[in-house]
Amino acid sequence: MAFENLLIEYKERIQYIIINRESKLNALNKATLAELHTAITEAFANIQVGGIIITGAGQKAFVAGADISEFASLGVDKGTELAREGQTKVFNLIEHGNKPVIAAVNGFALGGGLELAMACHIRIASDSAKMGLPEVTLGLIPGYGGTQRLTRLVGKGKALEMIMTADMITAPEAYEFGLVNHTVSQDSLLTKAEEILNKILLRAPLAIASAIKAINAATDPAVNGFDTEIDEFGKCFGTNDLQEGVSAFLQKRKPEFKGN
């Protein structure tokens, strides 16, 4: 499928999703969110894709926020609908996906851009990137999971400080706070993302999907995370991948997982 606001590239089993609105600092408008929903859904369903790297076009911005021009005419109902649709169709979709998603934060990640990065399973930032949730400067709060995911990643006190002051933080600060997994030079950003994802792709795909589900359950008050872990652990015993993994271990060879 051809997209107006995204570039899709493949590198063996890795699918790149590049937000391609460089003149708008890759801001997320409704059309881009709709395309992200389609692209991510298709990637999760594509058996040729093992994992996804999301990044922004150019070197200035990952995603510099939502497209504020679309907010002017919204009332309470439409504003609520906007947040609920974005959460369901993009941000929660990524977080609860069955394949690993890495955010390669190549520049500004502000507002909805930082929320997009936080929905990904792993975040890698260029050392010149800057991050923040400046919504209160517009009379808003984060609406795509920012209050929840930031609190889980950096703790309540730091989340309150970042959101209430609307201050940006640097990539080294983000690493110190636990907001990103790694910081690297701009030139090394995609190489590092690929290195991590290619290592994950050597592991059993169904086990990776189960790990994502179980780890997400740890911060979901609606479910018992321990029960989820037990269930997912048990399901692994019904896979050919487990048989392959055990056989390879006993035979002292590298496993060849098929994802079944």
Image (cartoon, helix red, strand yellow):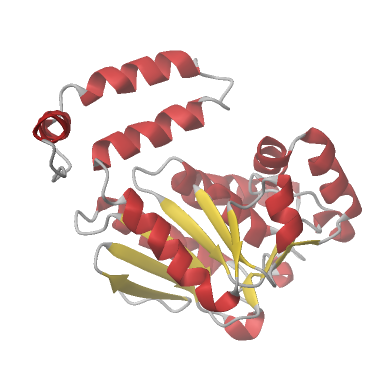
> Which residue is more in the foreground, 128 or 33?
128
> Which residue is more in the foreground, 92 or 79?
92
> Is 198 displayed left or right of 109 in the figure?
left
> Is 100 displayed left or right of 139 in the figure?
left
- The x and y percentages for residue 11 are 29, 71
Looking at the rendered image, the quarter that the N terminus falls into is: bottom left
Name which quarter of the figure residue 69 lies in.
Answer: bottom right
Q: Is residue 74 visible?
A: no
> Which residue is more in the foreground, 139 or 13?
13
- The x and y percentages for residue 238 are 15, 23
Q: Residue at x 13, y 46 (%)?
A: 256
> Is 237 displayed left or right of 50 in the figure?
left
Q: Residue at x 56, y 80 (%)?
A: 21
Toward the front, the furthest residue is 252
Q: Residue at x 69, y 48 (%)?
A: 143
State whether residue 28 is above or below residue 24: above
Say how many tags the image has: 0
State whether residue 218 is above or below residue 187: above
> Is 182 displayed left or right of 214 in the figure?
right
- The x and y percentages for residue 250 are 12, 29
Looking at the rendered image, the quarter that the C terminus falls into is: top left
- The x and y percentages for residue 254 are 16, 45
State whether residue 212 is above or below residue 121: above
Q: Residue at x 56, y 59 (%)?
A: 124
Name which quarter of the figure residue 240 lies in.
Answer: top left
> Which residue is more in the foreground, 194 or 91?
194
Q: Is residue 24 visible?
A: yes
